[in-house]
Amino acid sequence: MPSWRDDYLSALHERDKKEKANEAVYNRYAKLADRTATLQAARSAEVTRLQEEPRSSPNPKDRKISREKAVLGSPTTGETITKVRQDLSEAQRSRGLTEAKLQSVTEELQKLRIQSSLDSKRIGELSKEKAMLTTGMRDRDEELRGKAKLLEV
């Protein structure tokens, strides 16, 4: 009969398999979310810029003219898409570098944890050995004192 630990471990392995199978979907969704966020940021920046320009002119007719100039002077959709794609590719490259750095740091952390564990065990062993040697020294000193008393008598 399998123990609860075996059941638990098998459930964890099943979960890991499912997550690995869907990893491509997760990555595509992350890229889509990054792209959407970049587009929304660019769109909100453009809206903010357009909203701030009309406020500089107190005359309503001038505001209308300045809005038309802003729309005519703004970059085309193709230029905006190119800029967004460049930003996206830079963000993805940066993300890849960050993930690689995270992986190396995680591996180094794991090595250090293992080393720390080994060092802790070694410290424990040395502490026990020190305690045994200290006890042996005390016993030997007491024995020598006892012999010295016998010789004096």
Image (tube, rainbow, N blue to C red):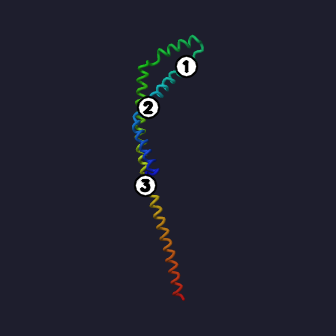
- C-alpha gap between disc 2 and disc 1: 32 Å
Q: Residue furthest right?
A: 58
- Disc nearest the viewer among 3 and 2: 2
- Disc nearest the viewer among 3 and 1: 3
**Which of marks 1 and 3 precedes in the sequence?**
1
Q: Is residue 11 above or below residue 120?
A: above
- Give the SS element for disc 3: helix
Q: Nearer the viewer, residue 122 or 30?
A: 30
User: What amino acid does circle 1 point to?
Assistant: Gln
Quadrant for the C terminus in the image: bottom right
Residue 29, numbered label: 2
Point out residue 140 in the picture as x, y percentages from the top left corner.
49, 77
Point out residue 27 in the picture as x, y percentages from the top left corner.
42, 34
Find disc 3 in the rendering and name its residue. 115
| Left or right side of 20 for 153 | right
Q: Do the residues labelled 3 and 1 touch (CB within 8 Å)?
A: no
User: What amino acid does circle 3 point to?
Assistant: Gln
- Disc nearest the viewer among 2 and 1: 2
Q: Are marks 3 and 2 in contact (CB under 8 Å)?
A: no
Q: Nearer the viewer, residue 19 or 118?
A: 19
Q: Residues within 10 Å of mark 1 (few under 14, many from 20)?
A: few
- C-alpha gap between disc 3 and disc 2: 38 Å
Find disc 1 in the rendering and name its residue. 51
User: What amino acid does circle 2 point to?
Assistant: Tyr
**Which of marks 2 and 3 precedes in the sequence?**
2
Identity of the residue drawn at 53% across and 87% down:
152
- C-alpha gap between disc 3 and disc 1: 59 Å
Q: Which of 34 and 6 is in front in this view?
A: 6
Q: Quadrant of residue 89?
A: top left
Point out residue 116 in the picture as x, y percentages from the top left corner.
45, 55
